Image (tube, helix red, strand yellow):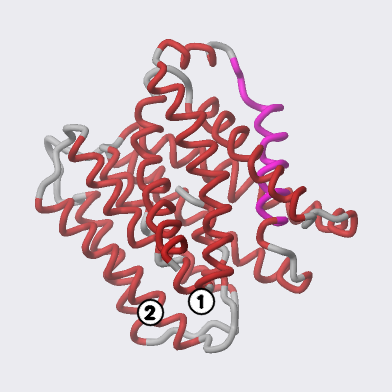
Amino acid sequence: MRLTYIGFVLLGLFWGSNFLYMKMATQYITASQITLLRILFGFLPLLAFALQKRVLTRSQFHCVGHFAVMAVVATAYYYYAIVKGTALLPSGAAGILGGSIAMFTTIATLLFLRSEKLNGMMAGGVLLGFCGIALIARPWEVLGRTIDICGVLWMLSATSILGAYVYVRRFLAPYNLPPLALATWQTGLALVVLLLLTDTTGIQNILQDWHATAGVVVGLGVLGTGTAFLLYYYLLQELGAVAASGATYVTPIVALSISWIAGEPVGILEIGAVLLVIASIAMLQIGRQRAQRGSVGISAIIPAKGI
C-alpha cells in the first residue's frame, strides 16, 4: 500500500512540474516542436509497456479512425495549446487553469450524453471552477493587465477540448479497450501527425540549455507523459478510478508551489484560485460518483492525459 501512495504523490508531482518545463523550453524552440518532443519521448515508454503487457492486438485496427480523431484533437492539439498558454502565463497560473479539465469534461458529458444527469454537487463544482478561472483571468483588469488573456484562452481551449473524451465514451467504450492500448494508439498516431506537420528548423536550439533539454525529454516526455500514464494505470488497478483521479488535486498545488520557488509572483488571487479549483474537482468527483453509482465514467480516462 505504501508503494501505491508513493505512486499517487509522484503522479501529482510529474503533472504539476510540467508547466515549468514547458516554460523553460519556449525560450529556445516553438510550441509545435515542444509538443513533438514531448509526445515522442512519452510514446516510447508507453509502447514498450503496451508490448510487454500484450494489450495491442490486430482486432483494434478497425478502430483506427476513432484513434486518429482522438490523436489529433485530444493529444496533438491539446498538448500544443497547453504549451502556447504556458508560454504566455506564469507557470503557476497555467497549472491552476489546467485543473479545469474536470469542469469542462462534466459540461461536455451533460451536453452530449443523455445518461448524465446534473445534480447540485456537480452544479456547485462547475460554479466554483468558473470562479477559480475568473481569479486567474481577472476580467476586471482593463488597463495594466497582469495576466495575458490570450494565454488564458489557450489554456481553456486545451482543457475544454478534452470534452472530446465524450467521443471515447460514445464510440470506443463498447469495444472495452484497455486504457493502456487506447493511450498507446492515440499517442502513436499523434506522433505521426506531428512528424508530418511540424517544422523542425531550429529544434536543435533546445540543446543550448541542458536544463531545458532534460525538462522536455525527461520531465515532459518520459516522466510527465509516458511514466505518468503508467503510474495512473497502476493506480487504477490498485485504487479504482475515483481514487486514482484524485491526483488531479495535487497538480495545481504542485504547479503553484514550483512557480513560487522559481520566483514567480504568487499572491492572494492565485491562492484563492487554486483553492476554488481544488474544491471544484472534489465536488465534481463526488457529484459524478453519486450520479453514476456502480459505473465507470469518463473520469476514469480523462486525468490520464496528464497536463
Magenta residues, as a range?
Answer: 181-200
Residue at image location 19% in from the left, 55% down from the top: 135
Would residue 262 be found to the left or right of residue 221 on screen?
left
Instruction: Report helix, strand or loop for mark 1.
Output: helix
Q: Position of residue 171 (x, y in %)?
A: 73, 67
Would residue 119 be found to the left or right of residue 66 on screen?
left
Foreground residue among 97 and 249: 249
Q: Position of residue 192 (x, y in %)?
A: 72, 34
Among the 4 quarters of the image, the one containing residue 91: top left
> 10 Å neighbourhood of mark 2: few (<14), some, or many (≥20)?
many
Foreground residue among 225 and 174: 225
Q: Position of residue 155 (x, y in %)?
A: 39, 46
Q: Amino acid at mark 1?
A: Leu
**Helix, strand or loop: magenta stretch:** helix
Instruction: Report helix, strand or loop for mark 2.
Output: helix
Residue 194 vs 113, above or below: the answer is above
**CA gap, disc 2 and disc 1:** 10 Å
Q: Nearer the viewer, mark 2 or mark 1?
A: 2
Foreground residue among 123 and 14: 14
Q: Which residue is labeled 2 in the image? A: 122
Q: Is residue 103 visible?
A: no
Would residue 48 be found to the left or right of residue 136 on screen?
right
